[in-house]
Amino acid sequence: MDLTSHVGNLGREFATLAEAGGDDARALAERLTGPLESAIRMTLLDVLSAAADEITRELAPGSVELRLRGRDPDFAVTPPPAEPPQDVVEGGAEDAPDSGPPIAEDGPAARINVRLPEQLKAAVEEAAAKEGRSVNAWLVRAASAALQRADQGRRAEQSGGAKRSQQRFTGWVR
């Protein structure tokens, strides 16, 4: 995405506004146009980054990332993985617990510090890179998926009543 035209449009709008102030205002606007260009570009990148974060929250477990190539922003979209049919994963639709609403990933973000063993950190970074995600996006998706699986397991235990063995198969099916 080329921001040059957008930055140029804002510069022209600024110059038009300065015309109303007379010669001194026009001269000042001309002197400020260069330094303002980088500030405008950075502001537009901030807006695009915030939009990508918001879209990622709505698309989870898929993601949208904003990447810079030189001075130009580029979007990298990772769609959510296709989910295998529930009856294949759970061994039959009648055994599948009713999955509740997904864990909300929108709303205010909280910052936490996590200490990981060096090998686990390297493995997380590698897995995130393979999926084209940031480590943060990968960890958010992994934590959300783990909590959903745990919730489904609790519901299956609660609805079981009498004890019975369950065969569970996990993985991807094509």
Image (cartoon, helix red, strand yellow):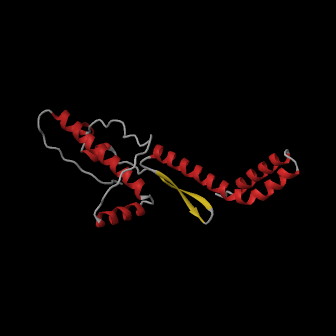
x 35%, y 46%: residue: 144
In the image, is 51 to the left or to the right of 103?
Answer: right
Residue 118 vertical placement versus 89 (above, below): below
In the image, is 45 to the left or to the right of 22?
Answer: left
Residue 79 vertical placement versus 155 (above, below): below
Quadrant for the N terminus, please: bottom right
Percent x, y for residue 157?
18, 38
Residue 60 vertical placement versus 97 (above, below): below
Quadrant for the C terminus, please: bottom left
Location of residue 172 (image quadrant): bottom left
Percent x, y for residue 164?
12, 40
Location of residue 36 (image quadrant): bottom right
Percent x, y for residue 127?
37, 62
x 48%, y 48%: residue: 56
Extreme residue in the front direction: 24
Percent x, y for residue 47?
59, 49
Given residues 139 and 153, the one toward you in this image is 139
Extreme residue in the right direction: 23
Q: How many marks?
A: 0
